[in-house]
Amino acid sequence: MNEYIVKSWNELQEKLFENSWNPSLGRFRSKFAFRGLSDVDYKLETTLIRLGGDYASLENHLLRNFSKYAHQNVVELDSMWHWLSIAQHHGLPTRLLDWTYSPYVATHFATANIEKYDVDGVVWAVNYVKANELVPKILREVLEREGANVFTVKMLLDHVKSLKELDELSRKDFVLFIEPPSIDDRFINQFAFFSISSNSKLVLNNWLELHSDLWIKIVIPKELKWEIRDKLDQVNITERVLFPGLDGLGQWLKRQYSSTT
């Protein structure tokens, strides 16, 4: 069974860190990417899909115009991967989906929206190491040469230079996990990385249903949200840390002083 409904803070800890022991390293190193959502019924849809309409045909236009109108010095290199990372960071609809290595950061996003305390939340956990087994051979070989489990922008530059090239690597849909350049402290503090699909129309939870060995879905009942939220605040997993600057400070204070009823 892939879906678990936790009944306590302690049970949540057990699920979040389950299977994190790596015997080959002799260390606790999870192979899971985590994503928290405030509503259990939310799908793993990209912002591009949520744009609606004929979004697939607009993808290249969005990215082309973003790179045209943005200051050129905002990217380290003039490559599709750098522009895609920057665009996602600044709210452009893309086929990227945000993930984190930190189960606590994901749990923050599952419990931060106080307007959603009347519904269950969820933390998705996807085994990105197993997901690599489904990518085309040319990309698996890149990971093997580097001894890596996640792609960096630099690792992809020589092999995939456009979204069209990514789409054409395989007839089967596949998903890559990518570490973006360290654009600012938000990426660093959120321990963030992305997934990207070879199919701009792919809703990730539909793809995961075909690969049940890759994921678990940890449901946080609405009755537990305040307790979990308060305990995350106590260990300093807050907007003030995850969104450095005045915006994060304002979000944190707003939630801190909001009523629980």
Image: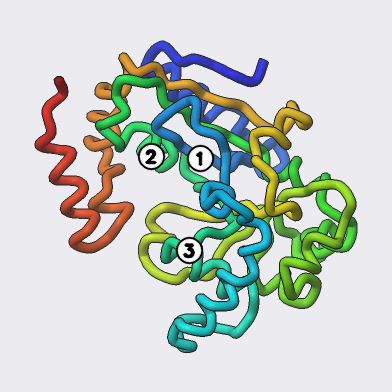
For label 2, count other residues whose C-alpha is less than 10 Å away and answer few (under 14), some (14-19) or many (20+). some
Q: Which of marks 2 and 1 is nearer the N terminus?
A: 1
**Residue 118: % across, % down:** 31, 20
- Which label sits on residue 92? 3
Residue receiving disc 2? 109
Q: Where is residue 165 in the image (x, y as percent from the top left)?
A: 80, 68
Marks 2 and 3 close (CB-CB < 8 Å): no
What residue do we see at 38% from left, 14% from top? Answer: 8
What's the CA distance linking mark 2 and mark 1? 8 Å
| Element assignment for label 2 | helix
Q: Quadrant of the C terminus?
A: top left
Q: How is the image coloured?
A: rainbow
How much space separates mark 3 and mark 1, taking CA atoms?
19 Å
At label 2, the amino acid type is: Phe
Q: Of the residues under marks 2 and 3, which one precedes in the sequence? A: 3
* Residue type, numbered disc 1: Arg
Q: What residue type is labelled 3?
A: Leu
**Callout 3: helix, strand or loop?**
loop
Residue indicated by mark 1: 35
Q: The N terminus appears in which quarter of the rendering? A: top right
